[in-house]
Structure formats: C-alpha cells, structure tokens
Amino acid sequence: MALNLVMLGPPGAGKGTQADRLGKAKSIPKISTGDILRAAVQAGTEIGLRAKAIMDRGDLVSDDVIIGVVRERLDKADAQRGFILDGFPRTVAQARALDTLMNGRDPLVVIDIVVPEAALVERLTSRLVCSNCGTNAEGVSVSAMDTTPCVRCGGKLKQRSDDNEAVVLERLKVYRRDTQPLVDYYRSRPTFRAVNGAQPMDRVYEDLAEAVDSAASGGALGGAVR
Ligand SMILES: [Zn+2]
C-alpha cells in the first residue's frame, strides 16, 4: 500500500525537517510546491512555462497552475509508492482538487502538527543562523549567540531577519486564517491524525511515525474513507 501523506502545521513547527526524515525512512519523496514549481520552470514543461509567465508578470500562481504542477509531479514513477506533501494543499479548493487526483490511489493520510502559538513565537524568534553561510544553528540560545561560532564555517551567528515577533505573529495569523478551514475539511476522516509538535524533535518524530502507521492501517481497514 502506498503512503500518500499530507502534512499540515504552522511555520516553525518543524514540519519540513520531520517530513524529510519520514520520507527517507519510508523511501518516498517529500514534495513541496515551491521546489516542484522551480523544477517545472527549469524543465520547461508546458505548465512550468505558464507558471513562469505568471511569476514574470509579478502575479501569484493560481490554484489551477499549482494543481497542474502537483498532478505532474505525482504522476512520476517515484511517487507511485507514496509521497509526502509539504505546503500543499493550502486551501480547501486545492484539497478538493487533490482528492480528485487521488481517485484510484490509496487514501490520503493527513497529519496536523499542532504547536501552541506561544511556543511557536518563542521558537521562531529565537532561531539563529550563520551570518556568513546561512546554516541554522541548532540548540544555541540567543544569549549565547555572540560567543558561539557557526559549526560549519566559524562565522558569526545572528537572528533570522524575518523572525522578529511582529512578523512571526502576522505569519501565524495568515496561517490560521488559511489553514483552519483545511484542518476542518480533513478532520472527520479516519486517516486524519493530530500530532503534538510541542516536544523535542525526536519525540515529535516518534509520535508522527506512529500516527502515520495507525492512520494508514486504519484507512485500509475502513475501506472507502471519502
Ligand atoms: Zn557558517
């Protein structure tokens, strides 16, 4: 059975990192729309060229184009045994389109990584990166920023510029506004699971892997889930 996974979770929940790790463990690709959009543009596919024309005009890429790009990506050989979607769907319209793409495939497993807002703000505003090479500094507190060099190049650490509190709160507000309807759309499915993201990364990963396995087998037992 293919593992067709959608991961939801606010910025700063560590979703991308967890998705990478799970994708490696399950030998399925992690697919983010930003990455495949760039790849489609580079490969010069028809949909990629459409996307490029839209972006060159400075417009936002429409649902139609995003869905087309996702469809192309999910049709590739490496996605037949499953995939992890990170950052898609973002809207209920996209989620409906994704359900259509799932016709004839195993049911979607949907994981929502839940982190209280206060913990997210704390986490996001305390993120440090190297001012020289851009590497994330893991486990270094803001107070130790001036005395701890980058592990890769020895450069000076700084706070990420988009991580000040007002910006973070705005990003979380946008996320809630856009994503809550999506969570509501999926919540009643037997293959939906919420995972507590306010734990150390390894614990989150354990809970995630367990939730995915239980949702995938539950979905199979339940038969048709839509
Ligand atoms: Zn560095």
Image (cartoon, rainbow, N blue to C red):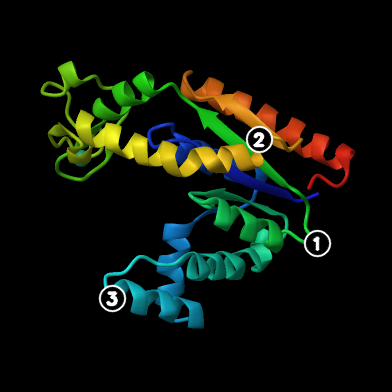
Secondary structure at badge 1 equals loop
Is 8 drawn above or below residue 60 in the view shown? Answer: above
Q: Nearer the viewer, mark 3 or mark 2?
A: 2
User: Label 1 to label 3, Cα distance in Å?
Assistant: 36 Å
Is 102 drawn above or below residue 195 in the view shown? Answer: below
Residue 185 visible in the current orientation: yes
Give x and y (percent) for residue 60. Answer: 35, 65
In the rendered view, does 156 fall on the left or right side of 206?
A: left
- The one nearer the camera, 107 or 63, is 63
Which amino acid lies under the numbered mark 3 shown in the image of this protein? Asp
Residue at mark 3: 56
Secondary structure at badge 2 equals loop
Q: In terms of sequence position, does the residue under pointer 1 or pointer 3 come before the other? A: 3
- The one nearer the camera, 158 or 166, is 166
The label on residue 187 is 2
Q: In terms of sequence position, does the residue under pointer 1 or pointer 2 come before the other? A: 1
Give x and y (percent) for residue 192. Answer: 68, 35
In the rendered view, does 179 fall on the left or right side of 5?
A: left
Secondary structure at badge 3 equals helix
Which amino acid lies under the numbered mark 1 shown in the image of this protein? Gly
Give x and y (percent) for residue 46. Answer: 49, 83
Name the residue at 69% across, 27% down: 210
User: Label 1 to label 2, Cα distance in Å?
Assistant: 22 Å
Q: Is mark 1 within 8 Å of ligand 1?
A: no
Name the residue at 66% across, 31% down: 193
Which amino acid lies under the numbered mark 2 shown in the image of this protein? Arg
Residue at mark 1: 104
Is 212 drawn above or below residue 83 in the view shown? Answer: above
